[in-house]
Image (cartoon, helix red, strand yellow):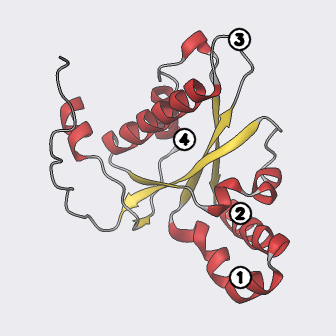
Amino acid sequence: MQLEEALLTRRSLSQLGAPAPSAEQLAFAFAAAGRAPDHRLLRPWRYLVIEGEGLSRLGNLFVASVAASDPARAEAESQRLRQMPQRAPMIVVAILARQEHPTVPDWEQWLSLGASVQNFLLMLHDQGFAGMWRTGEMATSATVRDGLGLQPQEQIAGFIYVGSALADKAAPATPEPFWQVWP
């Protein structure tokens, strides 16, 4: 796949199944993620790969997260919460590993992480896989963050659901021009 095709055809797909990328395919995707723009080469990101039994453990963390603030809701929604990680054969947790630096503010490190995730998704797409970057309440949960072993300065930027596309969806409409030449 050529770069132009990859950029113009990649989209988020929610219906994902096996197979997930192999270790070698993941290595290529993470190599691409590591080439993101990165002021001062801080590498303000890291990733956790979760699959197999880890998906069940993540579902249990989701239940525990809700139970910490609303036990009744956790009980009522426990099945749905446990099933959330089962929507794909693999989840890659994108983590902002923020670094203190006098010339690189937090917002630049977030942008670098976003570029890293985009490179990762594009390389997966190039290899024939699909993904969906999800956030939501579990991405900001202290219970989930601690359960995954994040350090105090780290934050979850999202859960990237990864696998093989089980269904396609139409490409989004071409947007109206959102750029202009100044002045």
The residues tagged by marks 4 and 3 sit, at their Cα atoms, a distance apart of: 37 Å
Residue 23, label in figure: 4
The residues tagged by marks 4 and 2 sit, at their Cα atoms, a distance apart of: 21 Å
For this rendering, which residue is in front, 53 or 121?
121
Q: Which residue is mark 2?
A: 58
> Please, is residue 122 above or below residue 100 in the view?
below
Q: Amino acid at mark 1?
A: Ser
- Give the percent coordinates (x, y) of residue 102: 71, 11
The residues tagged by marks 1 and 2 sit, at their Cα atoms, a distance apart of: 12 Å
> Please, is residue 71 above or below residue 87 in the view?
below
Left or right side of 39 for 132? left
Q: Quadrant of residue 76?
A: bottom right
Looking at the image, which residue is at 67% across and 75% down? 82
* Element carrying mark 4: helix
For this rendering, which residue is in front, 64 or 92?
64
Nearest to N terminus: mark 1 or mark 4: 4
Q: Amino acid at mark 3?
A: Pro
* Element carrying mark 2: helix
Residue 102, label in figure: 3
Looking at the image, which residue is at 64% across and 62% down? 137
Q: Which residue is mark 1?
A: 78
